[in-house]
Image (tube, rainbow, N blue to C red):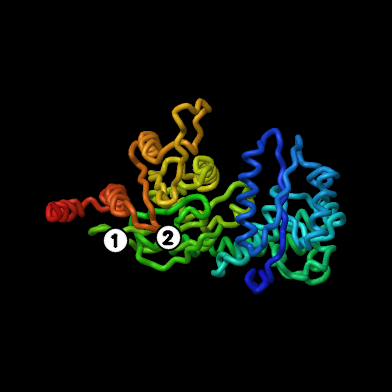
Amino acid sequence: MIEKKSISEYESEKAVLVGLITQTQGEAKAKEYLDELAFLAETAGAENVKTFLQRADFPNSRTYVGKGKLEEIKAFVEDNGVELVIFDDDLSAKQVQNIESELKVKILDRTNLILDIFAKRAQTATARTQVELAQYQYLLPRLTRMWTHLERQRGGIGMRGPGETQIETDRRIILDKISRLKTELKAIDRQKSIQRKNRGKLTRIALVGYTNVGKSTLMNLLSKSDVFAENKLFATLDTTVRKVIIDNLPFLLTDTIGFIRKLPTHLVDSFKSTLDEVRDADILVHVVDISHPQFEEQIEVVNKTLQEVCESKDKPMILVFNKIDAFTYKKKDDDDLTPRTRDNIPLEELKSTWMAKMNDNCIFISAKNKVNIEELKSKLYEMAKEIHMKRFPYNDFLFQKYDDLQE
């Protein structure tokens, strides 16, 4: 069971972040991933004091980084009172043991950090069950490390895991817990399925996208509700469904959990009942933070996850580029002959490029400043109306009469 103590109840812990530059992950990419890891750590309540990067062909099988880099990290940790070292990739049980014995502080990897945030964000019984299952699946291959260090009960970031009570955490008990949680989630899935059927044939629209792109803010704007929204990663774990009426047309709007890079499959699988809302949606609204320097890669991450997990390949989709108020670019000088990058492309050019790619099924908005929201509503109305008319053809006369009155 997830501990009740929240992240905010712990004092901020000093943390350093560690990543690798490899053949498949260049320096720019490694730095970008560490920036995202820093945002995750900040969301968890850590104070990031330094970042370490090492160039290597592949992670060291014993200590992730090389001996010299580990000694450099150790010296900094000891000199600056650092309590936590976070690695950007998943670590094996053996790696964690070796690193802990050398650094003498808590060691987390990216997945463990994300799970810690999930543990805090889970509000409903469904979300808590999903998070607990993901935690046990993460712990299972790491039993040797996790359960021989009973001093982990000292608390802090990454320590909000399932309860630790002596030897009950052996492999058989953990497998039993995983089996029980899967059974509970199957029951939840059945209940959610019944709820979805009871909603009738109303058109369903699901908001999807990378984490922290503004889905919940947009949800609040369209549905006039008060879904929790915050400028932090994974502010929303629970699926929220609201009935929305645009002009004379009702439909159901769903806010879903955000995706992120390097998210293990078992973590996504734990949220199957949440993703079922996406599977059952008639229309997907893919929200993108256009102010993010790597928004195109974020689009790819979301599309890949949707295709693999949600079977959403043939669903109608509208691409909503949010946060145009925060968009910036650097205009190249006329005598600058270096290749143009994403940072040199103005918003108007991006608009024309993506509108051509999406056959005009994309809109550029600012949910925060309510820019182009009416245009978005109009687009949603037309797409939802098309599906509604197929299900309720006898409503054609009413729609025609309403449209005539509007004119």
> Please, is residue 199 above or below residue 90 in the view?
below
The local secondary structure at tag 1 comes to: strand
- The spot of residue 226 in percent (x, y) is 41, 68
Disc number placed over residue 158 in the picture, else none: none
Q: Residue sitting at 47 percent across and 39 percent down?
A: 330
Nearer the observer, 270 or 110 = 110
Which circle's residue, 1 or 2, is located before the other in the chain?
2
Of labels 1 and 2, the one closer to you:
2
Q: Are marks 1 and 2 in contact (CB under 8 Å)?
A: no
Is residue 7 placed above or below 311 in the rendered structure?
below
Identify the secondary structure beneath mark 2: helix
The residue closer to the viewer here, 216 or 341, is 341
Kindly identify the residue that appears in the image at 48 percent across and 53 percent down.
213
> As drawn, is 59 to the left or to the right of 387?
right
Numbered mark located on residue 217 in the image:
2
Q: Which residue is mark 1?
A: 245
Figure quadrant of residue 249: bottom left
Q: Specify whether 283 is left or right of 269.
A: left
Neighbor class of circle 2 (other Cα within 10 Å; few <14, some 14-19, many 20+) is: many
Residue at 36%, 43% (x, y): give it. Answer: 362
> Is residue 202 found left or right of 238 in the rendered image?
left
- The type of residue carrying mark 1 is Ile
Q: Residues within 10 Å of mark 1 (few under 14, many from 20)?
A: some
**Percent coordinates x, y for residue 313 in the rendering:** 46, 41
- Looking at the figure, which quarter contains the N terminus? bottom right
Give the amino acid type for the residue marked by disc 2 in the picture: Thr
